[in-house]
Image: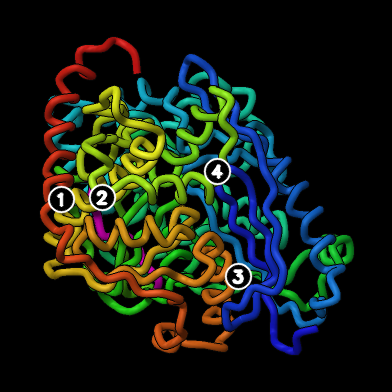
Amino acid sequence: MTSEELCLSIDLGTGGPKVGVVTLDGEIVVRELRHVPTHFDAKGAATQDAALWWSLIRESTKRLLEDSRVDSQALKAVAITGQYASTVPVNESGEPVGECVTWLDTRGGKYSRRVVGGPVQGYNPMKLQRFIRHTGGAPSTSGADPVGQILLLQNERPDVCDATRWFMEPVDYLAMRFCGVAAATHASRLAMWMTDNRDLHRLAYDEKLLASVGISSEKLPGLIAAHSVLGPVLEGVADELGLSRQTVVVSSMPDLHAAAYGSGATRLYAAHLALSTTSWISCSVPAKKTDVLHSIAAVPGLTNDSYVVIDNQETGAMSLEWFQGVLAGGGVKMTYEDMTALAATSPPGANGVLFSPWLAGERSPVDDKRLRAGFTNLSITNNSADMIRAVLEGVAANSAWLLKYVEKFVGQSLSPIRLVGGGAQSELWCQIFADTLDREIHQVKDPMTAQLRGAALAASVALGRRTLDELDSISTSVKVFTPDASLAGIYQRRVRDQVGLYERDKRWTRSRKTL
């Protein structure tokens, strides 16, 4: 049994919650992953059962606290991170009164376009300018964010709205289930674009922006500062789960922020790249800024005085998971390790096969929900090894395409880059990223659980055990990958090909009538 102070960390991914007991120094003691379904329909719905999240988290917590390595009295905090840009309608007690409308749901697009739509990249230019000046971004015209989701519920589910006390982000909803406090931070509410991010000490929503889209702040949880302690775990919850009644709940955060903590990239311009279901490249920066053309912004960051780069590529390591399913449909059952081992038998360049990873459209560096994925340049001589390697190289090339604009945005080269997420478990993929991005890549320890670790490290700051500067000195890397100069020509061409594939495919996909 560890003698160190512990944190109950929860990372609510789109595929389900990871629950772990983690030391306040970021060492994972025990953990488990639970799966939840997402319910899709042809009209653009993508919903999850928020009550199921809570049930699974309670089950996992009770099971983990029974482990002989865990001293429940040493659990000092509950810290929650995970998916964002989703909406859970809850009642006064924090119980869901409807399904969670997730970040994949586009049914609210028609309502968002009514309030912010127009002729400039789909936006009303006056409204877009006001949003960007105050917040750094703007509600998506696709409806895949809290504004679109709340407008959807207001227009199509008045029964749910009548029963709703607060519209909450998933991470804030889970915090409320633990402690009974309805609260949010600038960071947890960043995807709503309704806080004046020019001054992160101003803990209030922008009433003029809310009025412009027809949403009331009365149904939004109050704002608190980053690294806040919300309060103790509810006595009934503590007793049920086996937690100490002195355990407190700290303010929640998006997985973007937890990945920065968990990768050790907490100082200014220290970069991390997430190779998860989706993918992004991020670092902390000192000031608010926006690149509208490439969907990159600096949003509320790890502290109340700094910002973090936000961008998103809609498909990251999910590309490999998707292709695994394709192969399984043909009767070929391969593990993740089997697939990457087979990919290693194909040479750099995948014998000419190209893959564009736009399975769910794209957001950065181009915002195009109609864009679609595909293999290019297949011949009768190619095999599954070439196709798997092409998937790995295509995802890396997509990140290299984005990196060009991120580095221009921050005004400097980003190296080394810490790699987190399930895809970073593969040394082959890490090396492909180093060669394709032409940057030193640091594979983070247990990269699939970086956010669990990050949530605990953030809790250590909230409890006053560590400072943000101290976290940067905690070693998280297990292996360093440097670019192979002999392959520079192959991968430079591959990145150019990525842009060429986009220019070719965008004309065809825009002619299609369906998403």
Which mark is first along the chain, 4 or 1? 4
Q: Mark 3 sits on what residue? A: 250
Mark 1 nearby-residue class (10 Å; few <14, some 14–19, many ≥20): few
Q: Mark 1 sits on what residue? A: 490
Q: Main secondary structure of the magenta part?
A: strand
**Residue 38 location (% of width, % of height):** 59, 32
Q: Amino acid at mark 2?
A: Pro
SS state under label 1: helix
Quadrant for the C terminus in the image? top left
SS state under label 2: loop
Q: Mark 2 sits on what residue? A: 348
Which mark is first along the chain, 3 or 1? 3
Q: Mark 4 sits on what residue? A: 14
**Residue 239 location (% of width, % of height):** 88, 65
Give the CA distance from mark 2 to mark 3.
46 Å
Can residue 333 be seen?
A: yes
SS state under label 3: strand
